[in-house]
Structure formats: C-alpha cells, structure tokens
Image (spheres, grey):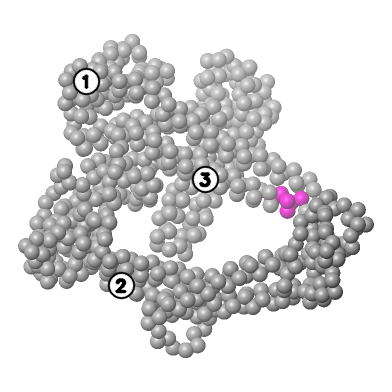
Amino acid sequence: MITPMKKYTFLVYHKEYEEFLKILGKLGVLHISEPVKEKKDETLRDKTEQLKRYNHALDILKNAIDDPAPESKKNTSSPEEILSRVEELMERNGRLEEEMIEIQGQIDKTIPWGDYDPDDFSKLKSAGYKIQLYHCPVSQFDTKWEEKYQLFIINKMKGIVYFLIVSKTEEDILIEAEADKLSSNTLSSLRNELEKTSIGLKEIQTELSSLSSFATVLLDKKRESLEDEISMISVILDTKKSSDDKLMMLEGWIPDDREDGVVNSMNEDGIVYFESVPDKNDSPPVLLKNNRFSKLFEPIGDLYNLPGYYEMDLTPYFAPFFMIFFGFCLGDAGYGVFMIILASLLKLKAKKKIKPILSLVQYMGIATIVFGMISGTFFGINLIDSGYTLTSHSLEELGAETLPDYLVSDLMVLEGEYFRTRSEFLSALEQQMDSQSFKQFSTDILKHSKPGAGLFSSFRHLMLDSISMFYFALIIGGMQILFGFFIKIFNITKRRGFKYALSSLGWFIFLVSVIIYAVGGKLGFLDLDVIRYGLYIMMGIAGILIFVFNNPDKNILVRLGGGIWDSYGIVTGLFGDVLSYIRLFALGISSAILGFVFNDISLQFLNIPYIGWLFFLILLLVGHSINLFLATLGGIIHPMRLTFVEFYKNAGFQGGGRKYEPFKTNN
C-alpha cells in the first residue's frame, strides 16, 4: 500500500533557520517539495566536487584494506592532507601503469630478436654496413632472399620468421617483408626497467594499505560532514523567502505515521507551521508500506516505475504471481532445494542489506520445489517416467477401492509387465479399456501402479505431463489477467471515482460469466440449459456498462463509439496477453530438457575405467550450473515482462510516482 502523506509548511525567522534545519535533518522525515533541479550555486558545486573526491579516495582505501600494512607511527594528518596524499599516490600509480604498458610493449617487440647489444650495430654502421631487421609469415618467406642478400634468420615464433640483412650502406633491399626498428635498449635493460616500475607500484599499494588502517574512519567522517553541508545548502536553495528575506518558508511532505515527532519538536521550539491533506493538484511523494513478504518484491517493482500517489500499489498483488512464474520457469525441485540451502547459509553471515534478497531467493526456491514436484523433475531426473508396473497387489487394491471387477479382469493381461514411461503405460491401458472407463479410472490406476523407485509413489500420479503443463501455464496467465481486471476497478475508483470504473466492471462481469459458463459446461457440474438465461442477463448488464458507461463525461454517441473501439482492443489484446504466458511452459520444459541431456551425457563417462567417475561429476556439476544460471536468468526476466506488460496493463497501472526521499543529516 501507499503511505498517506500530509503537507507541512514551516515559517521560520531567517536567523533561526539554520538551527531549524539541523533539527529537521536529525528527525529525517520531511520530503522537500519541488526541489530545484539545477542549483547554480558556486558553494554547492564546490562541496559536491569535494564530496566526489572523498568518495573516490574512500573507494581506493577500502579496496586496499584487505592486507593492511602495520602502522609505523601515530597519525596526525588531517582529512585534507590524507586526501591530497591519496590523490598524489593515484596520479603516480597511473603514470607507472602507463610506463609499464609501454615497457612491456617494447619487450614483446624485442623478445624475438634476443638480448642483443645495440653498440654492435653501431660498430657495423661505422664500418660502412647497415643492419636491417625484418619479419614476415613463414609461408611468405622466400629462400631466394638468402641467395641474393646476406640474410640471417634470428628466430621463428608463432608462424612468424624474424631475420636480419647485412648490406652496404648504398645497397637497396627489395623484399616483401615488414621492416622492424632497432631498439636503443637491450632486453635486459627493459626487463630491469619493468621490475623497477613494478616495485614502484607495490610501494604505492603498501602505502595505501598503511593509510587504509586509520584514514578510512577520518575520511568517512569528513564525507558525512560534507553530505550534511550539501543537504543544508540544497534545502536553503529550495526555501522560499518573503518579507525582505527575513522570513523563510519551507514546504514538504511527511508520512502521517511519522508526523508526531516533528509536531512535538516544532511545538517545543515555537516554530510556526501549517499542515494539510493533499488534494488532486498536489503531487506527494510515494512511500510503499507492505508486509514482510510483499516488501521483498518492492525492488522488482521499482525497476519499472513507482505507482502514482493516487493509485494502488500493485506490489502485494503481483508478488505471489511472480513467485509462481519463477518456479514455473525453473521447474526443477532439486534446483529449489539448492537455492534454499545456499541462501540459508549465506544469510548466516550476510549484511543486513543483503538479507532481504536472500529471503527472496528462499521464497523463489520454495516455488521452484513446488513446480518441480508438479512437473516431476529433480536435478534433471524425470520422476514421471520412473517406471510403471501393475502387480497382483495393485490390482487387488484397485478392485477393493473403485475399479469394477470386469476392468480388473481386463487389466490382468498387463500384470507384471514393465512400462518405462507414463505415455507407454497409458497407451497400454487405453487398449484394454473403453474410452469412458479410461477417462474415469486412469488416474487411480496410475496411483496404484508400482514405480521403479518408490519414493514418489504416493503423489506421482498428480504430476503433470508436458501437455498438461502447457495448459496450466495458460490457466495461470488467464487467472492473472482476470485478477488484473478486478484490480483495475479499484485502481480507477481510487484515482478518479467509481463511475469511471463501471466499464472495467462490465468487462470483469463479462469475462467471469463466460468462464463460468464454458468451464461449468466442460466439466459437467453446471446444467447449461438452466444457467443460459442467467448468462444472457449478466452479459446484458456487462454490455450496458461497457458501451454506456465507458466515458461518463461524454455524450451517448461518443460512449458507444468508445465502447466499440475498446471492445476491439481488449478482445484482440486478451488473446495475445494469454498466449504470452506460454513462455512459462517453454522455459520450464527447456530447463527440464537441458537437465535430462546433461545427465545422459554425464552417465556416458561412467563407462571409462578408473577415472570415469571424475569426468561424470565434473560434467554433472558444470552442466547443471549452466542450466541453473540460464533458467534463473529466464525466471527473472520473463516474469518481469509478464508483470510489467500484461498484468500492469490490465490492472490500469499508470505510474509516475516520485520516491519519498526525506531530508536527513548524519550528525
């Protein structure tokens, strides 16, 4: 839900304003109205730039604190001196890193030629000879060059041949190869320079580690002080002034469940203030307030948009569906067990900010276990196709419970026969039974058949095959869309009034009536002839609401035209929206298939003597890790798409709310 806000206006004498802001900052509940988007204040810009420098220095020191060096002497440096030293060290660090890259590049170019002495080339040049270095691919090297010139092959590396040619100064060299420049430094000297640079970088890291052992606390306090100063300056710039700048007026919003502290404090200090409830012309900030379960899903909703202050918060309504969709997409009970165990272990030492995320992972793991059991998948093992056998005992149980004697006799021909998959078993049953009996008793027979592994025998018959999961995805999608229409009625009522929600109410009545009629007739628990006239009445009411009350402010002809246009958009959109939920089935089945494939491939390695088990374990871990990663990624992205597109649209979500961000200071 959205927390109700109250608007407060404070009138403060200018000499008391700074002290008033300090009190307000400590309370930390007032959201300032209409903040200035672009504050052209020199002091504010300087403070903001200074804050960036401190934040950057803190990041550097916190990264260096993993292995802090012992402090050699007591520190007496100020935060400003520490900041300057850190920036100086990082500037030097940048120069050394650039030098290291340049030296390493020279070394890479020099390695193929070996550790030669440039003085030797100078002596040859003085004697009237010149040395030219070349390289080219081995395939392009022409042996005729060796006959024509004084050519010496120096090295061959990675398909490249490196060679030099000694010639007279006036002699021209005509070959198809790339010339290299002689380096003025030897390979040994370059490596020494690289080592010196590396030592310099280590010295910088050592000093940063030494600084991090005490400086982070000082810099952190200075950072908090700067944040307070920036907040104070920003609020002052947002303050309206009157009476020749003698009277300061500040407007803001306070949640109605947090106003007592402000009211008491203002009354004690004699501050003049006015309070009022927001009207339709106001734009209060949005503060969500949900129960422990729904609150975990608030970050997901924030990724799209906050609801407007005058509409409903949809977080509690999409949260259960999101959890269901995630479980559907993963669809493997083993992965769910792994997620719960991993999240539970991480929560033991996790920071307070991370624990809600891990709690969300645990809930997602529960949903994954449930849908893994529904689809019959456990770490890529197909529980549905775990073997089916009709024994004499199972036939006796069937006869004693529901199965007629003649059907028991017909099924005796299958006694003791083993069927590997459910489809094979059902196909054999269908051949031995008439269609009506098969439809009526097939589930009971599945329940009493003996599996290859008895662990899941008590509920294996309830597991759904892929076709059933396909229809299950569509049913869940239809339920969420219908629920969205229901929420839309209340959303529009809250935002505009009930008369504007009558058209949405008509669509809800129409859809519910059609579903009850269709499903009731299909399952046979309703007499269609009896309820047909009731259906006509409900559809007539729905039609009046849809075509007559779709836009109460317009004349009747505009309403009729709008109703026809809305009908076209809603009917065509509904089919597309429902079909979008097929992605749940597709992701779930693809995850299951990948798990099956990794298991099958891994089992092949067990045939390798002695070390086959090792390859089996490695591929099993790697394969299922990849599958879990991909399935989790899909299980987050696609439910978000279904929530933000299909559900939000049908629930009439508009969004555009501003987040509640109260003015608060650290000290």
Residue 93 — which label?
A: none
**Image location (x, y in percent) of residue 239:** 17, 60
Q: Is residue 115 left or right of residue 378?
A: right
Work out whether residue 363 or residue 251 is closer to the camera in this orientation and state it. 251
Q: Quadrant of the C terminus?
A: bottom left
Disc 3 marks a residue whose amino acid type is: Thr
Work out whether residue 447 or residue 381 is closer to the camera in this orientation and state it. 381
Residue 139 in magenta stretch? no
The range drawn in magenta is 612-617
Q: Is residue 473 above or below residue 160?
A: above
Disc 2 marks a residue whose amino acid type is: Ser
Residue wearing tag 1 = 559
Q: Of callouts 2 and 3, which one flags the residue occurring earlier in the amino acid sequence?
A: 2
Q: Looking at this rendering, what residue extends furthest in the bottom direction? A: 73
Residue wearing tag 3 = 632
Q: Looking at this rendering, what residue extends furthest in the right direction? A: 147
The local secondary structure at tag 2 comes to helix
Q: Looking at this rendering, what residue extends furthest in the top direction? A: 529
Q: CA distance from mark 2 to mark 3?
A: 42 Å
The local secondary structure at tag 3 comes to helix
Q: Which image quadrant is residue 147 in?
A: bottom right
The local secondary structure at tag 1 comes to helix
Residue 225 — which label?
A: 2
Q: Residue at x 16, y 43 (%)?
A: 281
Looking at the rendered image, the disc whose residue lies closer to the viewer, 1 or 3, is 1
Q: Residue at x 75, y 46 (%)?
A: 605
Callout 3 crowding tier (Cα within 10 Å): few <14, some 14–19, many ≥20: some
Q: CA distance from mark 1 to mark 2?
A: 60 Å
Q: Is residue 215 above or below residue 259?
A: below
**Image location (x, y in percent) of residue 636:** 47, 44
